[in-house]
Image: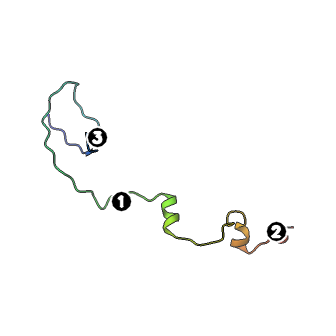
Amino acid sequence: MLQELEAVFDGTVLQLDGPLDLAAGTRVRIIVESVLPDETKKQPKTFLQTAQSLKLKGNPDWSENIDQYLYGETLSDND
């Protein structure tokens, strides 16, 4: 039986990307071929990575006074 799958070598062992359809104790022949990473399959950035990449500058009290910074409102405007 021939199965093709990918794995990552962690420096000690191969970590398979998927399960093997083999019974325990089955002897196999392994031919190793390095696979270049697929540049078209980029991992999506997390929100934190995106936010950090924007390199926004601002006052340290943004979260406390967000309405004032977004809409120009002050506490006296809301009374």
* Image location (x, y in percent) of residue 56: 56, 71
Q: Earlier in the sequence, mark 2 or mark 3?
A: 3
Q: Secondary structure at mark 3?
A: strand
Q: Secondary structure at mark 2?
A: helix
Question: Badge 1 is on which residue?
Answer: 42
* Image location (x, y in percent) of residue 45: 44, 59
Q: Is residue 21 above or below residue 77?
A: above
Residue at 13% over, 43% down? 31
Q: Are marks 2 and 3 in contact (CB under 8 Å)?
A: no
* Image location (x, y in percent) of residue 59: 66, 71
Question: Badge 2 is on which residue?
Answer: 75
Question: Quick one: label 1, few (<14), some, or many (20+) residues within 10 Å?
Answer: few
Distance from disc 2 to disc 3, alpha carbons, whole Å, reads: 57 Å
Question: Badge 3 is on which residue?
Answer: 15
Q: Quadrant of the C terminus?
A: bottom right
Distance from disc 1 to disc 3, alpha carbons, whole Å, reads: 21 Å
